Amino acid sequence: MRDYVRRLLIAGLIAICISLLFLGGKKPRAEGVSTHTEHWIWPAEGEITDTFGTRKGMHHGIDIASELNTPIYAVDGGVVSKSYYSDTYGNVVFIKHQNNYETVYAHLHKRNVKEGEMVRQGTLIGKMGNTGDSSGVHLHFEVHENEWTYSKENVINPDYVLGLTEIGQAVFAQTRANPGGSIETSSQAQAEKPKIVKKHYIVAEGDTLSSISRKTGISVVDIKSKNKLESNLIYPEQVLVID
């Protein structure tokens, strides 16, 4: 009888030890990172001015144009994997999401987050601008499976997660995107709200009205008229309306 009781006690102790090992192997979730959301949100309010795959397949994202300093939001929760300035992307923020996607927000006028910072869906991460290799104020948005690379072999069409897009389409910040849905259902939830979108050009060192006209396709006369310029004199960092 004593041997039977002893065997029961030993078996119980072994079971407790195994349970503790499994419990100890679980990693706590990082605080501040939201779980995977069913649908992403639009990162900015404005007008789609370019879609995925244009420019002979070299355009790896979508462009949303609006006013200078228009707020830019994280489409989903995650961790800021990069936040820096580059010659091509300008001020750019990368966010790694828990669903194995990495998103890119480029040409920002200002970055509001730093590398390693945890963000939730809808966190303000920056302001729309015209930095880097850009010819007007807009957000260039990319989606990469697993991670972004220089060769961009992991890039996917943002339409897969945001819904169908077309040039001239109005989108509204922080409204839910609708993967696989129509343009009407994914982006016009607030269609009754009128929106006038103006495009801007930030004057760079060495720019002239003639060179800006060649870059944008807007005549010098129209540029002067839209900006109420009485002469051809312009200066660096001046913001010109070029819609």
Image (cartoon, grey):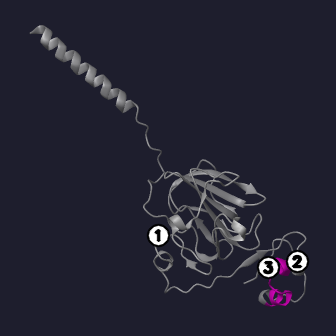
Q: Amino acid at mark 1?
A: Gly
Please say if 138 is above or below 223: above
Q: Could you tell me which secondary element the residue under label 3 belongs to?
A: helix
Where residue 58 appears, x then y in whole percent?
71, 64
- The numbered mark, 3 or 2, whose residue comes first in the sequence reads 2
Q: Earlier in the sequence, mark 1 or mark 2?
A: 1
**Secondary structure beneath label 1:** loop
Q: Is residue 221 magenta?
A: yes
Instruction: Report crowding for label 3: few under 14, some 14 to 19, many 20 or more residues within 10 A (C-alpha).
Output: some
Which contiguous range is marked in magenta? 211-225
Distance Cα–Cα, label 1 vs label 2: 41 Å
Q: Amino acid at mark 2?
A: Ser
- Label 1 or label 3, whichever lies nearer to me, is 1
Residue 126 in percent (x, y) is at 63, 63
Q: Is residue 142 depicted above or below 35 in this figure?
A: below
Q: CA distance from mark 1 to mark 3?
A: 33 Å
- The numbered disc on residue 211 is 2
- Where in the figure is residue 233, as x and y percent of width and height? 90, 81
Quadrant position of the C terminus in the picture: bottom right
The residue at the point 45 percent across, 64 percent down is 39
Circle 1 residue: 180
